[in-house]
Image (cartoon, rainbow, N blue to C red):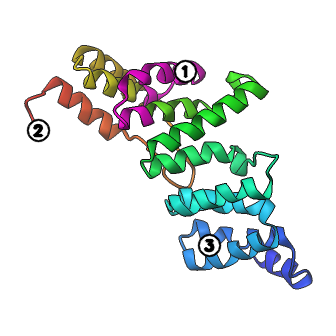
Amino acid sequence: MNEIEEILVLDPNHCDALRERSIPYLKRGMPQEWKKYIDQGVKCDPVSWIGWRGHHYLYYYRNYTKAIADFDATDTLTPNHIDTPQGHSVDFWRGHAYLGLKDYEKSLYYYRKHIDRVTTEFGEDWVEPEAFLNMAIVHYENKSLDSMPYYLDKALNYYQDQSADAKYYYALYHSSKEDKSKALIWVDKAIKDYLNSYYKRKQFNEEIRQVYVEEMIALEKKLKNPTKR
């Protein structure tokens, strides 16, 4: 941080340093300081940093509305280019944000847009497995259950059959279809994958719709003892 401050003494308009100054406050849960400095970085170089601010709103503060506003702004700033803050397209992130808002129609739209673009440009095997997984999650929450298996199969294929999340949602799918025997098989697989660390997670904060082993164990107990609460 001292080095960044020295850079800004020499060049007060060093956009990368302005943005970088905000990050320690972000990761230490000091939103007022983070907001002050990230806004300076965005004002200095909006093309580079407005999508990143949207990602911070999404993951650190769960402010889905502000995240979407920043992701949308990237389309205005770079109309012929899909920006990729934190290594993923803004369409991918918008799918996350609309899932957070439970706006399932828009969430599906942006996940599909992301999947279609990556598939067309690079091939389906370049699509993040999480995009397929989250499509299944959207269909589960939206109660359009019959669409779940297609996306869960895609996710499991690209996760190389190692995904506690996908297997847990397969258990929920079969449970919703009142097929308890299949649900138990899938939740058992999910627990095993979780204990082997095959589940989605982030380093500094909780994933969107992150699943924990306690939820899987609770589902397993419910399936084995449906009359108990």
Precedes in sequence: disc 3 or disc 2: 3
User: Looking at the image, which is closer to me, 139 or 131?
Assistant: 139
Q: Would you place residue 196 above or below residue 19 in this image?
A: above
- Residue at 81 percent across and 73 percent down: it is 44
* Sequence order check, earlier mark of 2 and 1: 1
Write down the region rendered in magenta: 138-166
Q: Earlier in the sequence, mark 1 or mark 3?
A: 3
Q: Quarter of the image holding residue 182?
A: top left
Residue beneath disc 3: 25
Dominant SS type (magenta): helix
Q: Is residue 154 left or right of residue 85?
A: left
Task: Identify the disc placed on residue 154.
Answer: 1
Q: Which residue type carries mark 1?
A: Lys
Badge 3 amino acid: Tyr
**At x 48% / y 19%, what residue is drawn?**
150
Dot 2 alpha-carbon crowd within 10 angstroms: few under 14, some 14 to 19, many 20 or more:
few
User: In this image, 15 relative to 108: left or right?
Assistant: right
